[in-house]
Amino acid sequence: MEKGKVAAREPVSVELQAGKEYWWCACGQSKNQPYCDGSHQGTEISPLGFRAEKSGEAWLCMCKQTANPPYCDGSHENIVEETD
């Protein structure tokens, strides 16, 4: 599966509501991070719809490299800086 561009190098804390549906941006191009705003149109990457299992704080991935989308798994720690 193709990974999206890095939107940020650390996760973001969000408050989720149990049973509510959310659309996590997987492409990294949304201006409404960590949620989808439709910017993936024209790419091969689609947003991930998910329903919160419980209410409360959750850490959503912003580097778009997680193996456990939409949640952070620490993958941002392994991103190599690109040099010119």
Image (cartoon, rainbow, N blue to C red):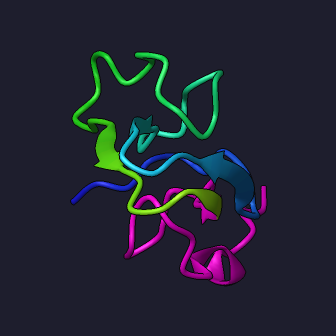
Residue 76 position, x and y percent, is 66, 73
Find residue 20 and report its image quarter. top left
> Is residue 79 or residue 60 the one in the foreground?
60
Which is the main secondary structure of the residues drawn in magenta?
loop
Residue pictured at 63% horizontal, 54% vertical: 62
Placement of the N terminus among the 4 image quadrants: bottom left
Residue 2 position, x and y percent, is 28, 54
Instruction: Examine the structure image and report whether residue 60 is included in the region drawn in magenta.
Output: yes
Q: Count every numbered label the image shows and give the total.
A: 0
Instruction: Examine the structure image and report whether residue 29 is included in the region drawn in magenta.
Output: no
Residue pictured at 41% horizontal, 44% vertical: 26
Residue 53 position, x and y percent, is 38, 62
> Is residue 17 or residue 82 the one in the foreground?
17
Q: Which residues are magenta?
A: 58-84
Q: Is residue 16 left or right of residue 48?
A: right
Q: Is residue 31 above or below residue 33?
A: above
Residue 23 position, x and y percent, is 39, 35
